[in-house]
Amino acid sequence: MTYTYEWTSAEESSLRREDEEGNVAFVPVAPGNRDYEEFVASGAVAEPYVAPPKPEPLTTEEKVNRLLTDYDLTRTELLSVITR
């Protein structure tokens, strides 16, 4: 079976392994771990870790909507609290 590997963190403490059918497994970097030892013995090279992009900041409207949802409030209820 053929696998591709990529690091899951900048610390390189775990690998993401995918086979040709798209099955994914996470392999901890640990002596005695059979899957990790297989990776080392195969001479395979893992793709470098790529950090996910930072999310865009929320707009004021998105923040208000989140407050309404998190606290199960209507806009009228929220306004009555902040305009006291």
Image (cartoon, rainbow, N blue to C red):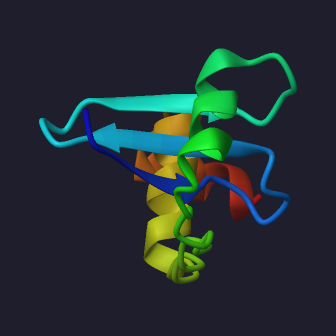
Image quadrant holding the C terminus, namely bottom right
> In the picture provided, is 32 more to the left or to the right than 40?
right
Q: Residue at x 51, y 52 (%)?
A: 66
Q: Quick check: 47 above or below 42?
A: below
Asked if 10 appears above or below 24 in the picture, the reply is below
Quarter of the image for the N terminus: give it: top left
Q: Position of residue 31 (x, y in %)?
A: 87, 25
Q: Nearer the viewer, residue 29 or 68?
A: 29
- Observer-nearest of 63 and 6: 6
Give percent across and percent down for residue 75. Answer: 43, 53
Residue drawn at the location 63% of the way across and 53% of the way down: 8
Q: Nearer the viewer, residue 4 or 14?
A: 4
**Figure label count:** 0
The percent coordinates of residue 65 (x first, y second) are: 44, 57
83 and 41: which is toward the camera: 41
Please report the residue visible at 18 percent of the width from the left and 39 percent of the height from the top.
22
Residue 1 in the image: above or below residue 33: below
Q: Is any atom of residue 53 visible in this view?
A: yes
* Residue 77 visible: no
Where residue 79 appears, as percent x and y from the top left, is 57, 58
Q: Is residue 83 left or right of residue 68?
A: right
Give the residue drawn at x 58%, y 75%.
50
